[in-house]
Image (cartoon, grey):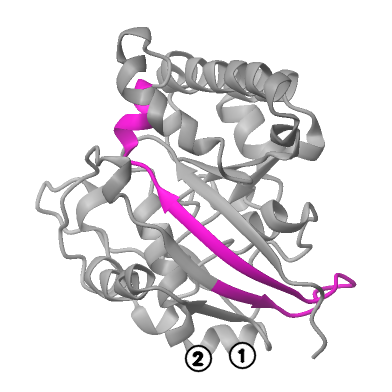
Amino acid sequence: MILSKRSTTDIRIIGPRQSGKTTYLATLAHCPHKKELGMRFPGLQILPTSHDAENLSRLAEDIIMRGEKIAGDYRRGLEVLPFYYFQIKIPPVKGLPSVAIDLATRDFAGEIFDDIPLAHKWTETEPYIDDLFTATGWMVMLTDWEPERDTRLYKPAFTKLCQEISEREQINPEIKKLRIAIVMSKCERGEIWPCRLEPDEDLFKVRLPKTYQVLNQKLPPERLQFFACSAFGVMCDRKDDFDPRPNRYIPDDGTPAEYSACLRQPSQWKPYGLISPIYWLATGKILYDRSL
């Protein structure tokens, strides 16, 4: 297989608390252990290449396979916030050439995103915002769509981020190359699984209209794309054996699902949409198979 020129993609993953950022990264790190992934997408390789990234695979076993509880997000200083390094090789997909990506990424605690629009928190938040602008792309993970979240958190946060983009790119023209992938996580949920194929129109425009409007007003389409992903997937998506129930078990012990959900059937594990946002952030091109 002849690979196109290797590209380096440095991204930041941000989003509110319990939006699935750590689970997403743990699933990405654990993918090399799933033989079925190679059967579904021959030639796809995802290799953790740092100690922290390799540890994420163990975390996937704890969170996704066994549903063990872990501490929620908390604010960590940038000096101790780890980078996760991966080498990703994507085979040719429907006319698109093969791509090799050196991925460097780190995820911020949910409190960072929550505090972005708060003026009295800006002194604490600004160092993280400065770090965002050292990256070539952002993956913003959202999971809730209540009208209050749309108007009181998401819209103000993106308004502030877009203001920072506008002001900083006047000083540093390289920021004009920044791409932003907005990702609806946990799309295995029955109410949004059918909407995963056109997430911009069927998820964000419908369920987060204020946020969707701000983003499209402030950012050109070549810098903004919408995606859906799921670390758990559904029970089965084969045409001859279709079972759209979420492949996710939530113990009935009163624990929030964000801390205790695990796979219902590990043998049926088919995460959805893990690579599509990364591919677009790295290349500016859309994978036609968004299930990848």
Q: Quadrant of the C terminus?
A: bottom right
Indicate the secondary structure of the residue bearing disc 1.
Answer: helix
Q: As rendered, which of 257 and 89 lies closer to the eye? A: 89
Residue drawn at the location 57% of the way across and 75% of the way down: 87
* Label 1: how many Cα within 10 Å (few below 14, some 14–19, many 20+): few
Tell me, yes or no, if residue 238 can be seen here: no
Q: Residue at x 48, y 48 (%)?
A: 185
Distance from Cα at disc 1 to Cα at disc 2: 7 Å
For mark 2, give the secondary structure: helix
Res. 93 in view:
yes
- Circles 1 and 2: CB distance less than 8 Å? yes
Horizontal and vertical percent for residue 108? Answer: 37, 42
* Residue toward you, 41 or 10: 10
Residue 275, labelled with which disc?
Answer: none
**Observer-nearest of 273 and 279:** 279
Extent of the magenta region = 87-115
Establish if 292 lies above or below 105.
below
The residue type indicated by label 2 comes to Lys
| Residue 63 location, quadrant | bottom left
- Decide whether residue 93 is among the magenta residues: yes
Q: Is residue 238 toward the left or the right of residue 287 in the image?
A: left
> Picture coordinates of residue 169 (x, y %)?
70, 24
Q: Which residue lies at the image location 42% right of the left edge and 14% below the top edge?
A: 152
Nearest the viewer among 253 and 63 is: 63
Where does label 1 land, which residue?
39
Q: Quick one: which residue is furthest to the top in this view?
A: 120
Q: On residue 35, which mark appears? A: 2
x and y percentages locating residue 227 in the rendered image: 63, 48
Q: Which residue is drawn at 79% across and 91% down?
A: 1
Q: In the image, what residue type sits under mark 1?
A: Met
